[in-house]
Image (cartoon, rainbow, N blue to C red):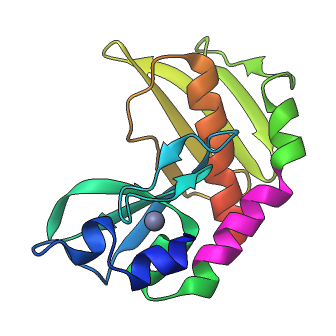
Amino acid sequence: MNEQESIANGRGKWSTIGIPHKDWDCIEIEDLGEPSLICEMCETQTIRYVHHMQHLNFSKVLRVGCVCAGNMEGNLSEAQKRENGMKSRTGKKKRWLSRKWKISAKGNEYLIADGYVVTIFEKAGELKASIKEKDGDQVIWSRRKYTTINEIKLSSFDYITRLLSDK
Ligand SMILES: [Zn+2]
């Protein structure tokens, strides 16, 4: 059963009362490297590319596959565009960690790439990242918890991929 069929058959949360089925927003997309997570919406599809979906009337962020994400946000082509953007940068992602990360005056690792400046730092014992437009003022701060530097660096890469595909 593919994800579209799972939705049509009302698998998982698609038939759960009290869970919104539309008006979700994607806040992040992540590449797990291999299919290794069950979509939290249809609870059927094993996914590699994880769309993190948020809803005003639901407390939890759901991690879902492309087709569920498209249905949740009411725009399947947008979800596919996001996922294709991520797939096209897979090779680049493999080299991301071995690129020349520099050390800032404050002692933080940073990398300038794809028009953005990624800075990794520690705040109150937690790893944080900021992504700043190289020629702009917009700064985005990480929101999730990370346990390793590599994890947060890779997540930053995925976030930039998302920003690029939104352009
Ligand atoms: Zn799904």
Q: Does residue 35 belong to the magenta stretch?
A: no
Q: What residue sits 55% from the left and 58% below the top? A: 138
Left or right position of 5 against 56: right
The range drawn in magenta is 79-89
- On the question of residue 84 being in view, the answer is yes
Q: Main secondary structure of the magenta part?
A: helix
Q: Does residue 87 belong to the magenta stretch?
A: yes
Q: What residue sits 57% from the left and 40% below the top? A: 36
- On the question of residue 167 being in view, the answer is no
Q: Where residue 119 appears, x then y in whole percent? A: 61, 31
Height in image: 130 above or below 2? above
Height in image: 56 above or below 78? above
Depth check: 74 or 42 in front? 42
Depth check: 43 or 116 in front? 43
Q: Quadrant of residue 8?
A: bottom left
Q: Where residue 105 appears, x then y in whole percent? A: 65, 15
Q: Quadrant of residue 54?
A: bottom left
Quadrant where the image shows the N terminus: bottom right
Quadrant where the image shows the C terminus: bottom right
Height in image: 86 above or below 92? below
Q: Quadrant of residue 83?
A: bottom right
Q: Where residue 3 appears, x then y in whole percent? A: 53, 71
Depth check: 164 or 75 in front? 75
